[in-house]
Image (tube, grey):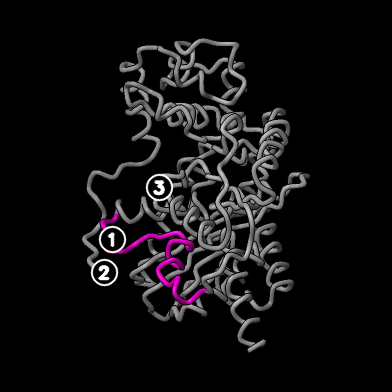
Amino acid sequence: MNGQAGKNKESVPTKVFLRGKVSEYSQRCIECNRCMDVCPVTKDTFSIHDLNVASQDGQSVPLKIQEFAFRCMQCGQCVPVCPKDIRRDHMVRYIKYKIRNKTPWGYKRYLLIKGPNQTGMRRIIQQLFIRSKKLTNKDLACFMETTPEKKVDVLFYPGCYIYSAKTVRQTLRLLKHVGSRYNVLGGVTACCGAPHLLQGEFDQADDCLELLYQKIKACDPRIILTACAECYEAVEQIRKMYQMDVEVLSVAQYLLRYQDKFLVKKIRGKITVHDSCRFRPQSPQGVAAHDAVSRFGELAKPPMDQPSSCCYKWNHGSDPNNALRLVNYLTAVKNHAPTLVCNCLTCFEELKKTSTDVEIIDVLQLFEEALQASETREEES
């Protein structure tokens, strides 16, 4: 890797790191309850003190707090409101680790084929999944479950979302249009480990992260692109952990560096941005999405009474109120704009499952539509 200086000596296994942080947080907590007041999850059956105790290593986790932990989708709304800089989401994440042998089927199913070094029946199922996807997406098969051998400046890392064929094809077309020389690294065997981390499977998350680093190192890129907020966080963690001289960007951020290659024209009307819990509005990735919408359409304000903080992906349906929250949110969005743009691929994949009159698109679709409009104008002239 460019400027590779070796692994940060302060790096420790996730379970060890969080065990220490949880103990520190519990001592620091003043039990003001602000974190719980903003939490969208049902949580009125226990106190903040009960939650602090349950998060401690060696303490049992009562059933009501187990239920709360599995309903938690790690949206992070609890973090900015804490006056003591406590990561409540990390404390609940550690509870998930403590009760990982009790995870609901939705959690287990999601991780069934994700990650390297699968064995037994899970490996068989994983290989059958990969083969079926390669057969149905032959144009992308060469990018699936492989580590690129050529070395170029840009590495597009879709991770597990290599199988979201429409978005991947959009990205490849746009990268080609701006003249980028790129590699692609994706597949369930190259999972970033974020799905495992958010579910409390820390050992698997650490293994995924280490293998992904080795694959990135072999590619030796200068820039790493991803459209998934969780993948972005994982790659950014690798960059810091291994002190890598590499730039990590969302695909939208990267494309805006080449905005002169896209038609300067409003191709859509009002559009609201769904700001994901990891690509918040003030983040560079969130700003890029808002800039893209302003460039290609009319940016509409989001509904203030129904904030778009989460797509509710990461509790895997454990909270029965997820569906109602999404319906209420999308109903409020409809009063502001007919189209909702997602700045994170996870949000897009999850929100588009909801039955709604609101058009839900990925931010990259705006770039593709601008490219199509440009091509149409050239044909007409």
Residue 145 is tagged as: none
The crowd level at tag 3 (other Cα within 10 Å; few <14, some 14-19, many 20+) is few
Q: Earlier in the sequence, mark 3 or mark 2?
A: 2
The crowd level at tag 1 (other Cα within 10 Å; few <14, some 14-19, many 20+) is many
- What amino acid does circle 3 point to? Ser
Q: Is residue 87 above or below residue 204?
A: above
Residue 314 visible somewhere in the drawing: yes
Instruction: Examine the structure image and report whether residue 219 is included in the region drawn in magenta.
Output: no
Q: Secondary structure at mark 3?
A: loop
User: Residue 75's spot in the image, x, y percent?
Assistant: 52, 35
- What amino acid does circle 2 point to? Asn
In this picture, residue 239 sits left or right of residue 330: left
* Residue at the image point whose x is 24% and y is 64% from the top: 4
Q: Is residue 366 above or below residue 320?
A: below
* Residue at the image point whose x is 67% and y is 29% from the top: 319
User: Residue 246's spot in the image, x, y percent?
Assistant: 31, 64
Q: Are marks 3 and 2 in contact (CB under 8 Å)?
A: no
Gap in angstroms between the C-alphas marked 2 and 1: 7 Å
Q: Secondary structure at mark 1?
A: loop
Q: What residue is disc 2 on?
A: 2
Q: What residue is disc 1 on?
A: 244
Q: Nearer the viewer, residue 143 or 10?
A: 143
Instruction: Examine the structure image and report whether residue 257 is included in the region drawn in magenta.
Output: yes
Gap in angstroms between the C-alphas marked 1 and 3: 21 Å
Q: Which residues are magenta?
A: 242-262
Q: Secondary structure at mark 2?
A: loop
Q: What residue is disc 3 on?
A: 283
User: Residue 45's spot in the image, x, y percent?
Assistant: 60, 11
Q: Are marks 2 and 1 in contact (CB under 8 Å)?
A: yes
Q: Nearer the viewer, residue 175 or 318?
A: 175
Q: Nearer the viewer, residue 266 or 202?
A: 266
